[in-house]
Image (spheres, helix red, strand yellow):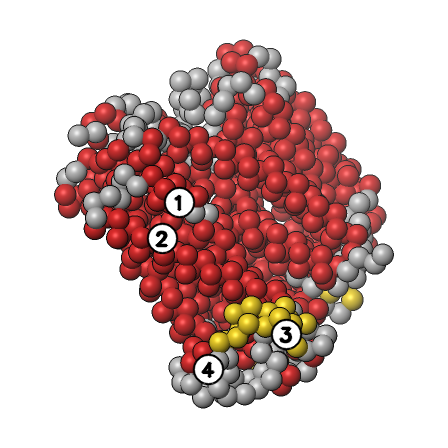
Amino acid sequence: MTLDPLLLSRMQFAWVIGWHILLPAFTVGAASYVALLEGLHRATGRGVYLRVSNFWIRIFAVAFGMGVVTGIVMPFQFGTNWSGLSETAGDIIGPLLAYEGLTAFFLEAAFLGVLLFGRTLVPAWAHFVAALMVALGALFSSFWILAANSWMQTPVGYAIVGGRFYPMDWLQIVFSPSFPYRFAHTVVAFYVTTGFVVLGVGAYTVRRGLFHDEGRVMMTTALSLLAVLVPLQMFIGDQHGLNTRRYQPAKLAGIEALWNTGSEVPLTLFALPDQSRERNDYAVEVPYLGSLILTHSLDGTIQGLKDFPTDQRPPVAIVFWAFRIMVGLAVLMLLLVATGWWLRYRHKLFDTSWYLRACQVTIPIGFIAVLAGWTTTEVGRQPWTVYGLLRTAKSVTPSLSGRDVLVSLLVYAVAYLLVYPTGLTFMLGLVRKGPREAAPAPVEAGRPQLPVRRLPSSPQSEEVR
Amino acid sequence: MTEPTLSFVGVWTALIALGVFLYVLLDGFDLGVGMLHGFAHDAADRELIMNSIAPIWDGNETWLVFCGVALLAAFPLAFAIIIPAVYFPILVMLIALIFRGVAFEFRFQGASRRAFWDHAFQAGSFVAVFAQGMVLGAFIQGFRVDGRHFSGTSFDFLTPFGVLTGLALLFGYGLLGAGWLIIKTEGALQEWARRQGRLCLIGVVIGIVIVSLWTPFMEPRIAERWFSMGHILFLWPVPIATLAVVVWAWRALAGSADAAPFVAAIVLFLLSYLGIAISLWPMIVPYHFTLWEAASPPSTQAFLLVGALFLLPVILMYSGWSYWVFRGKARSDIGYN
């Protein structure tokens, strides 16, 4: 058996980034949610917002710590396994990745400590500003990493000199054609992910009955946010699709498993795409709907996969199904939110046991959708790293043997399978403890305990109204 | 793509050199403390030792990320050749750092399995440092390069010289860690730290001597750099100063001063760092590409410099402030409890 370092490197990257992305998927939203709660507390003066905020700050801290630790792995992947990409495109993606690192670093250094440990030590407004800055900082981190990703998906503002990418216009590079859509789509996805976590944990808290007020606040804030965010996300996703059709037609054809170019294209709901025979088996199609959705007109033309040489097509089945999982979950999300609002309208939200359970069960829904969406866009851009210009096969480190990568992949596999369950157990413990005002936030992996503990201890009780 | 009119190579060389030195110094001492802490006599001492680095250790670690991404952005060719060449040391280091972080976290969560996490923390520290030492060894030995790619195998790093630098760095970080503990502790524990420091210093001196004698034989260009007539006139103070600092460090460890051992250790690291820089200058990929040849274009370096010059001072000031607030002896009642 021959081990292919390229395939194994791709698996390794998918593995380490797949686990890593779960943490920002939660922390980006959690940071904003905490800022919102702090704002609500300042506006209304109600102590319950503060208790809920402190509760989520504790969980946020653990997730952020794990995000830092697993994040350290990421930039090194571009060297260990993707040195071809670094050498060819480092002049452009290098500073974008570096800005991401610096922003996270900056955020961590300057504001996170105040948010986590400083409530009794700085004025209330300063604590609120820290919460806002952490939320903003998390968004900026996403900004840079998605700028790098988007440039690779839709490269502009470059020249190719001596076989390497040379930056010509940084404004174009940062704001590449797919960037606004990808950024909006990803950030809202992260917000939605957090929303369902909060909704589910709120439902759990309500069911337990120990912290009824806090549980209610979590559920109502989450439902209010999700009522806006989920439909908004569907709209942004649609716009993102139009953008993909324009700039990455092969990816779009893969998503729809569309082999032949045509107008009045049906929408394929179910199919088993067969890459080698260039056809779909057992296809279930809705006439005209494909054109309608993808071009916003009944007879819009969509390019099929056969328009592209076989060595320039993405693996169709993966992209097709990952996309359908994402959209299916989106529909489920909409249903959950709508049901929640209907129950609320009937004043039965907090007493409908099956709905509370459903919210609890669907806590991971956003994470799964994020992974599915990420799979769609990353597998869909194959076989390219820099779309249409640099092949993934040319991006991999040339010195690696298959055995090298197999070893590293196994090591990462074992490490993450140990670390993640441990971290999850820890977070579940915090959820079980509930939004009580106990000792100061436990210290989490990857976070310095702030100087504040050094100062004369101020009882936390004063924050409880 | 060098445009002689405007170059930021010097600035970025300085920034990355500073970043690497800060990382080695800061994470060096807390990794050293991590290694030493397992040898402490009892649980109370271990607790105090951990508390002495609790507030700052992971802030130290983030300099590693800075060095990584700054190298990628400012010298992408160096990044693309060096990192693959040290594939396994990097892998081992990253995994060790992950486990070290997790162990640190969990030892403070439940007392029940504290001994287990303590061992994990110590082991993680040892492994991470040894891996970093091997990276250093591979760097000094230079890389096999074909065109613009590393052309060796992923096991090129595994040489006697690499093992030597790995061991030397264990003692070096141990020395820094001992120096830190002397500042942060008192009484019997401090005495213990002084003994550990002296032990480490012996290891460091042996390491420095062997590396200094070995490298000129290994690489004629290094011999030429140090021993040609024009150079030796300027360079003789470096080994002399190193000798003087070793004596100073030994006396400080044996004496009663709190801060002197740590300061002496820092100066010793600075001199070793300088020695390596003199040997390799101006190579960033020894012995194939100079800093200028591996640099990204001015446009790239300038683009990142704008942000770095704004963000770095803030990060530095904040880090300095945390150290200031946490000054003084470590106490058992302060820290994670």
Check disc 4 and report its element: helix, strand or loop.
loop
Q: Is there any visible trace of residue B314 in the rendered image?
A: no
Q: Quadrant of the C terminus of chain A?
A: top left
Mark found first going from the N terminus, 4 or 2: 4
Amino acid identity at mark 2: Leu
Closer to the camera in the image, B66 or A413? A413
- Looking at the rendered structure, whether the residues under marks 4 and 2 are on a common chain is answered as yes
What residue is shown at x 55% (from left), y 62% (from top)? Answer: A322
What residue is shown at x 61% (from left), y 80% (from top)? Answer: A259
Q: Which mark is residue A358?
A: 1
x%, y% of residue B327?
40, 28
Quickly name the residue at label 4: A288
Q: CA distance from mark 3 to mark 2?
A: 32 Å
Quickly name the residue at label 3: A280
Q: Quadrant of residue B94?
A: top right
Mark found first going from the N terminus, 1 or 4: 4
- Looking at the rendered structure, whether the residues under marks 1 and 2 are on a common chain is answered as yes
> Label 1 is found on which chain of the structure?
A
At label 3, counting other C-alpha atoms closer than 10 Å, the crowd grade (few under 14, some 14-19, many 20 or more) is: some
Q: Quadrant of residue B319?
A: top left
